[in-house]
Image: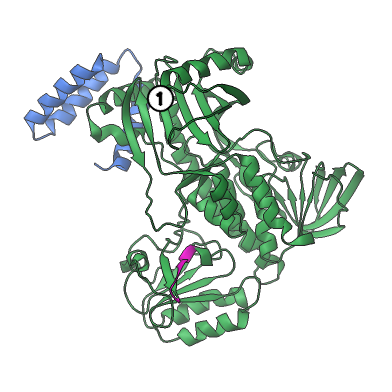
Chain colours: A blue, B green
Amino acid sequence: MNSTELDTAYTALAHALTRVGQAQSPLFLSMLCLSLMSRNPDLGQVLALIEQAEAQHSA
Amino acid sequence: MQAFTTLPERVPVLIAGGGPVGLTLAALLAEQGIASLTIEADDAYCVGSRAICMSRRSQEILGWVGADKPLAEKGLSWTGGRSYFRHEEVLHFEMPSDPLQRYAPMVNIQQFYVEQYAHRALQRHGDLAQVAWSSRVGDVRDLGDAVDVAIETASGPRTVRADWVVACDGGRSTVRELLKLHFHGMQYEGRYVIVDIEQDTQRPVERLAWFDPPSNPGSTILMHRQPDNVWRIDYQIADDEDADEAIKPENVLPRVQSHLDMIGETAPWKPLWISIYNAKCLTLDSYRHGRVLFAGDAGHLVPIFGVRGLNSGLDDAGNLAWKLAWVLRGAAPESLLDTYSQERVHATRQNIEYGAKSTEFMAPPDYGFRLLRDATLRLARVDASVNELINPRQSSPITYAGSQLNQPDGAPSTGNAAAPGQPAPEALLERDGKPVHLTSLFGRGFVALVNGTTSGLAALQALQDKTRGAASPFEVVTLGQGGYADPHGQARKHYGAQPGTVYLIRPDGYVMGRWADAGAAASALAAAAPFYA
């Protein structure tokens, strides 16, 4: 995905998050992540990204 | 500035507003041999530094009137910037630039200097471009074949009849109000305080941004250096802060001090100018209303982030000047001015789209954008794949896709960089051993760029000979033997290497058409001929 495409996806996700609202966002984001993970052919990368996000989220 | 000017009774172009766009337009018109009268309510150049980042394209436009040199000498050029999340650097970006370039991608300079250089440029034309300071437009009456403009001057009311009026009178345009026209669009709630301070610094010239800095937790801060030891500092205020309170020095100065302390700028400093801003995406639906045209903030307000405000206003002036000149000479139909509106309204909509994206990151408008920005900044520390989302998407010239002026593309295989509707790419050429930037040939008349020889070249050259010495001559630039050399391969890179290709470039430096077949020169001539009939 190039930076313009990432930008477009970012904007679409931001609008969706606002529509879904704060309370339902964890569920919404979990569903989205599951869909993205199931399409990623590299399990090692998925596990590493989970670890990375966990390490950074509270930093 | 001397207030009194004996106003003419009649003038081809009356420009309402002597800011950077109005004064540049007057200078561009004078360069084309067109007389104008600029009406400015203030008695001098603007106060406060206001718009400070001048794009490469703006420098090119100012170059058409010779105002680029003082700008480059006085201004501080830069090519990139850094963004920080708290203490950590999360983005270091560089804008495209190379050592052979004519202009830096961006130059920081106070707006009043730009006004001064544009004013000096028009003064070189004597009475052709007059400026009436301390004068206000009181009424505008479109008579169909002319416009009567009532003007309040220091020495009483006057009426001037103009063929065309161009409103360059800013975001609170009097002309727009008089014509009962309204902006359409939206604005963002997030507000930024803008502060200019004077402080000695040795820091490199870069765009600096801090998200959630320890100096001002929760805020976003931008810093730009300007000439004369001036810093521009922008910071976002909380949603519940009162705007009037927020700009009081007792509330501004501690925040600035705290940030200067954090980044280690310890020299004594003093505030010069404080203002407040929220991002707006507003435009008129058309920039032509009968004989009244709109340029700059009078016609559109775009978000500050990405510096598309004044830069797009100068692009308006660059687009409009040659079209007005041709219409006033009777060398083009009035409908040419409709293409000004079409192209520049399109440009505004693009600028708003990019500016909105910048704003949604710099001042997230709602829950979704806030959450995603928080996520991006945290992730950017370790995952470079998201860094580009932090990039401020600086202003760049807009492609006039779908413009009526574009000719059908006769050389699509040459690539998209110089397709019809694109700003003509720069190329450092050489003639008689001297370097010549291709863009330095723009700003007057049409330019035909011919790769090598082609049948029909003689007819193009005949038109060049016929128009030599005119205000807007037709110019043929031949690449190859007997013409311009391309020692760095830049022309080949952007315009293709196929011999016999002909590009027709508009006076404002946009590609109008290109052809690669045996009839290329004839096609270019046919497209240019109506403008030189």
Give the image location of residue B335, x and y in percent: 63, 63
Name the kind of residue labelled 1 in the image.
Trp
Image position of B450 (left or right of B338):
left
Nearest to the observer: residue B278 or residue B211: B211
Give the image location of residue B177, x and y in percent: 73, 38
Q: Residue at x 49, y 43 (%)?
A: B351
Q: Quadrant of the image for the C terminus of chain B?
A: bottom right
| Tag 1 residue | B210
- Compared with A45, B457 (above or below) is below
Q: Residue at x 37, y 60 (%)?
A: B417
Q: Which residues are magenta?
A: B432-439
Q: Residues within 10 Å of mark 1 (few under 14, many from 20)?
A: many
Give the image location of residue B36, x and y in percent: 75, 57
> How many numbered circles does the render carry?
1
Image position of B192 (left or right of B207):
right
Q: Quadrant of the image for the N terminus of chain B?
A: top right
Image position of A46 (left or right of B412):
left
Q: Residue at x 60, y 39 (%)?
A: B110
- Compared with B532, B352 (above or below) is above
Can residue B128 be seen from the camera position used here? no
Nearest to the observer: residue B298 or residue B265: B265
Image position of B314 (left or right of A43):
right
Q: Indicate yes or no whether the magenta region holds residue B429.
A: no
Chain of the residue where label 1 is placed in the rendered structure: B
Q: Residue at x 45, y 56 (%)?
A: B401
Q: Secondary structure at mark 1?
A: strand
Can residue A29 be seen from the camera position used here? yes
Nearest to the observer: residue B40 or residue B355: B40
- Compared with B7, B375 (above or below) is above
Q: Which of the 4 quarters of the picture holds residue B204?
A: top left
